[in-house]
Amino acid sequence: MSNQLPKGNKHATNKRRKFRKSNDDNATQNDLIFGLHAIQAALELPVSRVTEIYLADERHDARADTLINAAKQHSISLKKVDRDQLDEMAPDARHQGAIARCTPLKELDETDLFKLVEQLGDGDTAALLLILDGVQDPHNLGACLRTAEAAGAHAVIAPKDRASGLTSTAMKVSSGSAERLPFIQVTNLARVLRELQQLGVWLVGTSGDSESTLFEADLKGPLAVILGAEGRGIRRLTREHCDQVIYIPMQGGAESLNVSVAAGVCLFEAARQRSL
């Protein structure tokens, strides 16, 4: 599961094109990808959704050449523009001198999630899901997507309200994982948790005040690991739907981990147990 630009300005005297600005951190649009690595990852998919690429005319390095060659191989238009135009397209973003216009990713919902879980069954390919309960920082969402893919998770789920969507920032931080790993936003997380339980998925929440550690939990079989928002943790209603609540034992003076780090610890422990 994965996610064009209007034709060039016909007026030759107009050297500056005007681009639509977007509030990247608050919008859920993902029709822009910025950053050389993120664009390259999108081009490496069997069917790329990239339709046009803008490259800073000041870039004459090996990474830029690689992007140019990839665009040629896919017959994708690449335009050299000045950096000011890129800054206008992605205000306050670290675009590294490259932005791609794309067709939007297909929006996935509860129906897609339940079909996926049913297809995976309860054998060696049993579902491994990451559920983010209200993570609002797109950087953290992108990092969680990257971590989840690396651990072998099958999907990342998040509520639509009061949570980050797949913004361009999240796409960039995911380093291509958002292109390959299903990201599913749901309207009612509590209802989805109940449905997952009916499908045989074991729900494991995380909380610092739990009495059971991650390493004591049985994480084999269909599983969803649930992590909460930065600083607040999982919500009360979400916790009430969990089959088990665990904590990550830590040493030293650290009181908590970044949500993407915690996701990595939990998912890789689940992957380790499932491989035994």
Image (tube, rainbow, N blue to C red):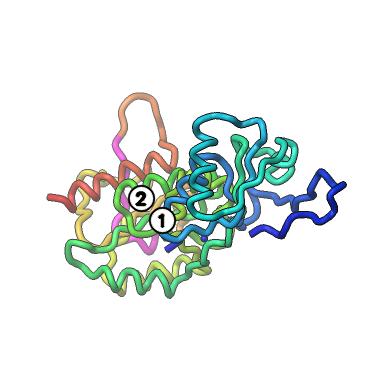
SS for tag 1? helix
Q: Is residue 223 found left or right of 82 in the rendered image?
A: left
Nearest to viewer (mark 2 / mark 1): 1
Q: Position of residue 205 (x, y in %)?
A: 35, 54
Q: Earlier in the sequence, mark 2 or mark 1?
A: 2
What range of the chain is rendered magenta?
A: 237-249
Residue 45 is labelled as none
Q: Is residue 229 found left or right of 78 in the rendered image?
A: left
Q: Is residue 140 found left or right of 95 in the rendered image?
A: left
Q: Furthest residue to the left? A: 276
Residue at 87% x, 47% y: name it: 13
Residue at 61% x, 45% y: name it: 99
Q: Is residue 245 magenta?
A: yes
Vertical side of 71 occupied by 236: above or below:
below
Residue 221: image quadrant is bottom left
Q: Position of residue 87 (x, y in %)?
A: 71, 39
Packing grade of label 1 (10 A; few <14, some 14-19, many >=20) is some
Residue at 81% x, 56% y: name it: 10
Task: Please state which amino acid type lies under the numbered disc 1.
Answer: Arg
Residue 180 is labelled as 1
Q: Is residue 192 magenta?
A: no
User: Residue at label 2?
Assistant: 149
Q: Position of residue 100 (x, y in %)?
A: 60, 49
Q: Is residue 78 found left or right of 129 in the rendered image?
A: right
In this orientation, which residue lies closer to the viewer: 28 or 5? 5
Residue at 32% x, 52% y: name it: 245
